[in-house]
Amino acid sequence: MKICLIGKNLTNLVLAKILSNKNLDVDILFESGKEKKFSQRTLAISKENFNFLLEINNKLKVVAWPVKNIKIYSDKSISQELLEFRNKKKENFFLIKYIDIFNSFEKLCKENKFIKLKKLNYKSKTKKNFLEKNYKLIIDSDKNSKFNYNKIEKNYNSVAYTGILNHEKKHTNDEAIQIFTKFGPLAFLPLSKTKTSIVFSIINEIKIKESQIFDLIKKYNLKYKIKKITELEKANLKFIMPRNYVNKNTLFFGDILHRVHPLAGQGFNMTIRDIKILCSLIDEKIELGLELDESLF
């Protein structure tokens, strides 16, 4: 049988690779020209989840950076941390650029005989009928999906700016810093000895120019001798959750379930948790010799 994954995104690329390891055929359907690859976006992945991903794709260890310490500051006490999370013996989490992990899994999927990437025109009503007739299992993790579903939506009234600091070499750049400023939370997330990711979530009520954001980043920078700051990418922040996770033989998954504020840094970690659970349920069905259909959901 074939399983249909809607959306060419990181969630589906990871899930497709795992399903292919079970000798299951997978079609990844996506709308041409709609896939986005954010060059400055980064992901913080817990050590347990990173090890899980390494079992599927061992090339990730080349592009990931370990972080052993997290320090929290506020605008009022910039010189003294409010909280500290340190683990001297092992990493707290790993930082990885979204584009690097996306490209790595995309390459694996393109080389895999069990996985097919196909373009889909969402605007055609016949496509939905086609999907329901040709696939017993559909997993939709495309946050821009045109298939209607009822959802709970909250606007955080904030914009997230992401970029990369290029700085002088630091021999132990393994400490993440988060500062709660009056403009919104600002995070410095190490990517290598010479590069650090920045995520600045700014409240919409505060009218500020992009040139001023660069000045604020420099102001709150505690330890880097900055050579250059890349162009900032921005995205409006919203919380979105479907009221129902399942519609007939379609499961809503990935970003559709876990669009949360980057402050928590847990969106993709929750997705990995869901992938583990889904795959364990699939394994149970296979071991019992049962058909993979909507009863799985």
Image (cartoon, grey):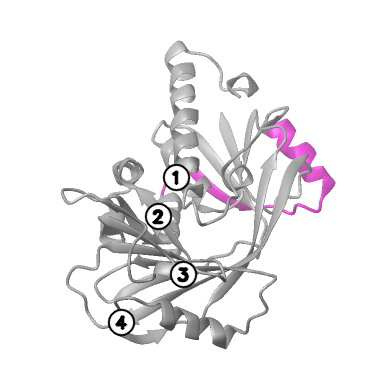
Q: Is residue 114 magenta?
A: yes
Q: SS of the residue at dot 2?
A: strand
Where is the N terminus found, in terms of image quarters? top right
Identify residue for label 2.
44
Cα–Cα gap, marks 4 and 2: 20 Å
At horizontal 56% and vertical 18% (from top left) the residue drawn is 291
At horizontal 56% and vertical 44% (from top left) the residue drawn is 254
Identify residue for label 3.
75
Cα–Cα gap, marks 4 and 1: 28 Å
Q: Which residues are magenta?
A: 112-134
Give the numbered dot on residue 269: 1
Residue 174 place in picture, x, y as percent: 25, 63
Q: SS of the residue at dot 4?
A: strand
**Do the residues under discs 1 and 3 have CB atoms within 8 angstroms?**
no
Q: Earlier in the sequence, mark 1 or mark 3?
A: 3
Q: Is residue 122 magenta?
A: yes
127, 73: nearer the viewer: 73
Tag 1: residue type? Asn
Query: Which label lies toward us, 1 or 3?
Result: 3
Q: SS of the residue at dot 3?
A: helix
Query: Which label lies toward us, 4 or 3?
Result: 3
Q: Earlier in the sequence, mark 4 or mark 1?
A: 4
Query: Which label lies toward us, 3 or 2?
Result: 3
Q: Earlier in the sequence, mark 4 or mark 3?
A: 3
Identify residue for label 4.
167
Q: SS of the residue at dot 1?
A: helix
1, 41: nearer the viewer: 41
Tag 2: residue type? Ala
Where is the C terminus found, in terms of image quarters? top right
Cα–Cα gap, marks 4 and 3: 23 Å
Q: Residues within 10 Å of mark 1 (few under 14, many from 20)?
A: some
Cα–Cα gap, marks 3 and 2: 24 Å
